Image (cartoon, rainbow, N blue to C red):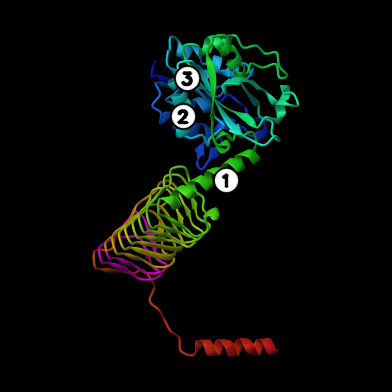
Amino acid sequence: MSKKLGCIVLAAGEGKRMKSALPKPLHAVAGRAMVEHVIAAAEALAPEKIVVVIGPDMKQMADAVRPHATAIQKTVNGTGGAVLAAREHFKNFDGDILILYGDTPLVTTQTLQKMVDIRRQFPAVGLTFSGMRMTEDNAYGRMVLDDDGTLKKIVEFKDASADEKKITLCNGGLVCADGAKLFDWLSAVGNDNAQGEYYLTDLPAIARKDNRQTHVVEVPAEEMEGVNSRIDLAHVEKLLQQRLRAQHMTNGATLIAPETVYFSFDTQIGRDVVIEPDVFFGPDVTVHDGAHIFAHCHIAGADIGAGASVGPFARLRPGTKIGKDAKVGNFVETKNAQLGAGTKAGHLSYLGDAEIGDNANIGAGTITCNYDGFAKHKTTVGKGAFIGSNTALIAPVRVGDGAITGAGSAIGSDVPADALGITRGRQVNKDGWAKEFRKKNTKKKDE
């Protein structure tokens, strides 16, 4: 039996109930488009090819799934018609073909592997279908088993009899088929049903006439959750977040209030990391061992070093790199900024397009003035430098190792190492002025 594998991802649905100009499978869950979740699960099986079936005028979808090929389903005529649209990509293909759905982002590689393994284990099996146990109150197709436990047929809910609707084994949608036979079987599918469409669910009966069995692989119902509306999207997001939270805690992170922490699909969390409530991780974040993320932080595109602390109420934007044991405190925003080991930016600062050396101190209210209205410019702060409170660093500018800037200064020229940079005007005290001011104004008020 051939060990080759091909995958077809059905992603032609317009998603009208989403009320969106964006194709349904491109809506994101945990920071990644649904169809990309599905493709990633399939890619882990190392298939020879993945073909994504899309609708006409879906250039955005075609761009999103590159480098994988696309096939166009010109007419909305059911899942069977969608798979047939990919036929030209599988000429003379004698391996297995796995059929997936672009709006089921919770499917796992383990489930897909099981579908393929069962298909290959028994030569008499021409098809494996995913099945899930559900209560009677649902609109999924019902899986009718034969006496030997193989799948006799799948009845779509709208076509099911009252007795068939009581069946709790329901169609999960995934199919693994003998690629040498799949498209011949699909050519025999008719559309004599309530929807007038060509269903993949007709395949078991057709394969049976060809003396090939269909096995059901029971999978967790959660993995088969599809998205047809914004409400469904929110539900799937919730399920995936629960999975990600459990994964990170199992791997050694502490989440004080797990239900309030939101991860992206690619968030990397080290051991002994503590994450407080109400933290949001956007894509491309790595948090190294022993770091502490305080409450109410928004973090995306950042690398947080071992033992570092962030927040509360901090925002780390893409390009941020926080060194070992560094501290980014409350109401500090960073963007494309590198903070060295042991460096502290305690509060109320903006650090953009900046490179800050080890063990520097960034005083409260410090900002890097990195944008001149046309271009971004870089600020460099040396090792051990001390930036006084309310310093404006007007880029491009360099503050040398060990240098100090006076509080309230606007630093627009380089400060040499170990020097003091200060731009404040000299303070003048007028003795008795305040007393006379109060006396004068009190008299006017009494009049």
Q: Earlier in the sequence, mark 2 or mark 1?
A: 2
Quadrant in the picture for the N terminus: top left
Determine which of the numbered discs, if any, sits on residue 226 in the image: none
The amino acid beneath tag 3 is: Ile
From the image, tell me which residue sits under label 2: 114
> In the figure, residue 385 lies in which quadrant?
bottom left
Q: Sequence-wise, which precedes: disc 2 or disc 3?
A: 3
The location of residue 113, given as percent across then percent down, is: 44, 29
Quarter of the rendering containing residue 406:
bottom left
Pointers 3 and 1 in contact (CB under 8 A)? no
Q: Residues within 10 Å of mark 1 (few under 14, many from 20)?
A: some
In this rendering, the answer to whether 410 lies above or below 118 is: below
Q: Is residue 346 above or below residue 174?
A: below
Give the residue pinned by disc 1: 238
Q: Amino acid at mark 2?
A: Lys
Q: Position of residue 440 (x, y in %)?
A: 60, 88
SS for dot 1:
helix
Q: Start and end of the magenta stretch?
A: 384-413
Q: Residue at x 66, y 17 (%)?
A: 197
Quadrant of the snapshot with the C terminus: bottom right
Residue that extends furthest to the front in the rendered view of this protein: 147
Q: CA distance from mark 2 to mark 1?
A: 25 Å
> Mark 1 or mark 3, which is nearer the start of the sequence?
3
The residue closer to the viewer here, 318 or 36, is 36
Residue found farthest to the right: 162
SS category of the residue bearing label 3 = strand
Mark 3 to mark 1 CA distance (whole Å): 31 Å
- Residue 280 visible somewhere in the drawing: yes
Q: Say if residue 186 shows up in the picture.
A: no
